[in-house]
Image (spheres, helix red, strand yellow):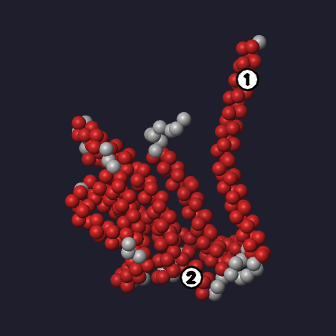
Amino acid sequence: MTAGFGSEDGASASRTRPVYRGIGAALPAATALASLLGLCLLWSLAAEIWPSRAFPPPLDVWRVLLKEAASGDLGYHLAMTLWRVAAAYIVAMVIGSVIGVLLGTHRRADSFFNPWLVLFLNLPALVVIVLAYIWFGLTEAAAIGAVAINKIPNVVVTMREGARALDPRFAEMATVYRLGRLDRIRHVLMPQLQPYFAAASRSGIALIWKIVLVVELLGRSSGVGFQIYLYFQIFDVAAILAYTLAFVAIMLLIELLLVQPLERHATRWRRRPA
């Protein structure tokens, strides 16, 4: 009888355990949703207390968002901005990672180019964008290049620190086992640099899309930045907020559905805390 009760208790515990796991997994999403709803309520209350064209309530912004989406303008301009963000991100991460690893592993080159790096780190983004448009014209290449140049120094600094922190014992192990160049990069270099690459990648996305909006505002005829500038001319704050929030929502989805799963996949070999 005791064994029977024990088996039943064990079976019921095993059945309830996945339920608790499911609740625990859904809790962060529910908390975030409740937080956003609270923000919307606070926004609505503030708009009621201070009624003004310059501070529209959330429902007005939502109506404009639906109107722009139905006309197709929202989707087109979001796609153009996303294309520029993706192109600038790839260029900045590839070039910045290569330069950062080279500087981190070659001390003389690091000493020589460090003043260049400090100069570009402190060069205002607006200056780079204006010069790119003046020198190369109001083209897509100039816009994407200006955004990438603004991000490359940050990637170089992060990846340089990662290269400096490389464990020489792994390089010695690769020499003992006579690993080829590609195997060294794949099995020795990349796993050690992954945390630094992830940090540069995450901060890069957050910085690049903000600079892309400035690039579009100054010299492009499409994109979210151009639309914000257009509606600024007629003081349509609801439309400005609609385009801004739509693009922020897309970037959050990219973070949740693409960046974080890829990061978990890349670090799946690490030990998880108990």
In this rendering, the count of numbered labels is: 2
Question: Going by the picture, which residue comes out furthest to the left?
Answer: 108
Gap in angstroms between the C-alphas marked 2 and 1: 65 Å
Q: In this view, does 171 lie above or below 234?
A: above
| Picture residue at 25% right of the left edge, 40% below the top | 172
Residue 67 in sight from this viewpoint? no
Q: Residue 229: x, y in percent?
A: 56, 82
Image-based side of 30 in relation to 254, left or right: right
Q: Residue 75: x, y in percent?
A: 60, 71
Residue identified by numbered label 1: 9
Do labels 2 and 1 touch, CB within 8 Å? no
Tag 2 secondary structure: helix
Residue 39 in sight from this viewpoint? yes
Residue closest to the eye, 47 or 206: 47
Q: Is residue 39 above or below residue 178?
A: below
Q: In which quarter of the image is the N terminus?
A: top right
**Residue 71 lies in quadrant:** bottom right
Task: Give amino acid for label 1.
Answer: Asp
Residue identified by numbered label 2: 229
| Picture residue at 51% right of the left edge, 55% below the top | 259
Q: Residue 256: x, y in percent?
A: 57, 55
Q: Residue 57: x, y in percent?
A: 73, 74
Tag 1 secondary structure: helix
